[in-house]
Image (cartoon, rainbow, N blue to C red):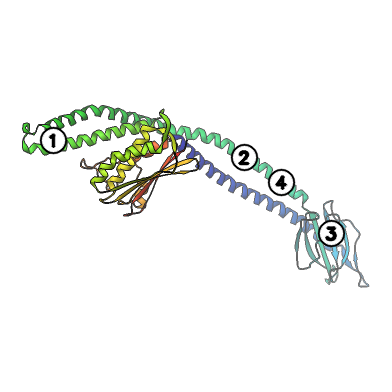
Amino acid sequence: MFKSIRDRLLLSYLLVLVAVLGSFALAVRITFARSLNEQLLARLEVLSRVATQELELEDDGVIEVDDEVIVSVNQAVQWFDVNGNLLGQQGDALLTLPFSPTEVLQRQRSPAPVQGITTVVNDYDTGQFIGYARVSESTVELNATLRRFDSGLGGGIALALGLSTLGGLWLTRQAMRPIEQSFAQLQRFTADASHELRSPLMAIRANAEVALKYPEAIRSGDRDKFTAIQSAATQMTALTEDLLLLARLDQTQILQMEAITLASLIEPLLTLYQTQADSKAIQLAVKLHDGDAVVNGDRIQLTRLLTNLLDNALRYTPEQGQILIQTEVKGEHIQIRVQDNGIGLTPEQQAQVFERFWQADQARTYQSKGAGLGLAIAQAIAHSHNGSLSVTSQLNQGACFTLKLPAQ
């Protein structure tokens, strides 16, 4: 139980950490990429200002391009006239995209990754519109820088998660240790108290039974009192036995495992509870899976589990009701369903039905027939067999408890 809690706590911690680190890494990556792109655009704007000065309008109306080299290794410049005709170019990082005077910013991925901007060129002396300058720069180095940054950032996050996992394991163990110790003390107290209460309760019960066996020795008005004492002692004896069993189930124990056929497990219970079902005119039916379905488990504990389910169904099923026990093999698991058409459970009650000391009618007096531990014991036994116990129900339409166990 505590291992499962530790695992869930560690998983929650890691999920939160992943979300925080992921958000941080994404923000840093976006900021870094934007910064690199802004630097690239700044270089292109400087180159563009220089390129516009290289396009000149001669006295005879002819537009000339100066032959002075103005680009670096990974840059290029293209000059166009007012009609978009290429006048000249420099550099190797050229944009091969069709020239479009309306697209100020252009990006291409093939044949080489290049980014460029287009600027209108006016004659320096007259201010007359004479053409365009399109400057570009290769983004190979920028992309390589981003890949190196991503690798470093990813490696840092992986290292942080690894160290955080180790730290989380240590922290969750430290956090759970006081809880485990307190729970162990409570287990010991429950087991010791239950064990110590058995003898005095048996004495009280035995004396009450003796007094009721010889009614002539007691006053007529005291008979009801002895009956109440006997009923309370019986219930408290059952309660101490259940508490002792729960304390043992909570601890690691060695089960007496054996191969058990479902028929040999269920049929004796039908014989045992048939009389009780007949007293309420309840139809008790069974539908076993075709063939010999076999589970590997502790016969005594599994019998206790099914006894608790049947007892619960009989208690909350009205007269002339129906109870069906059905088994089914699904893959590597065996399902045993105990279904009734009794009072049913609300969704809120279904969430509480396996809690200790919880009862649908919230009865707590000695007149009640149980202490609300039966289903808690049943679920604990199911978990000890690597199985599960669940319930589906609708109010006033009955309930169906499904036991799922690994097949042999």
Q: Which residue is mark 3?
A: 77
Residue 182 is at least partly visible in this image? no
Q: Earlier in the sequence, mark 1 or mark 3?
A: 3
Describe the element under mark 4 as helix, strand or loop: helix
In the image, which disc is placed on residue 158? 2
Question: Which one is in front in this view, the residue at disc 4 or the one at disc 1?
Answer: 1
Q: From the top left corner, tell me how far across and down residue 12 is, in percent.
A: 50, 42
How packed is label 3: few (under 14 Cα within 10 Å), some, or many (20 or more)? many
Q: Position of residue 364 (x, y in %)?
A: 24, 43
Q: Is 79 situated left or right of 20 in this image? A: right
**Image quadrant in which you'd find residue 216:** top left
- According to the picture, the residue beneath numbered tag 1 turns out to be 226
Tell me what residue is drawn at x 15 percent, y 29 percent.
207
Q: Amino acid at mark 1?
A: Phe
SS category of the residue bearing label 2: helix
Residue 274 x %, y %: 28, 42
Proximity of marks 2 and 4: CB atoms separated by less than 8 Å: no
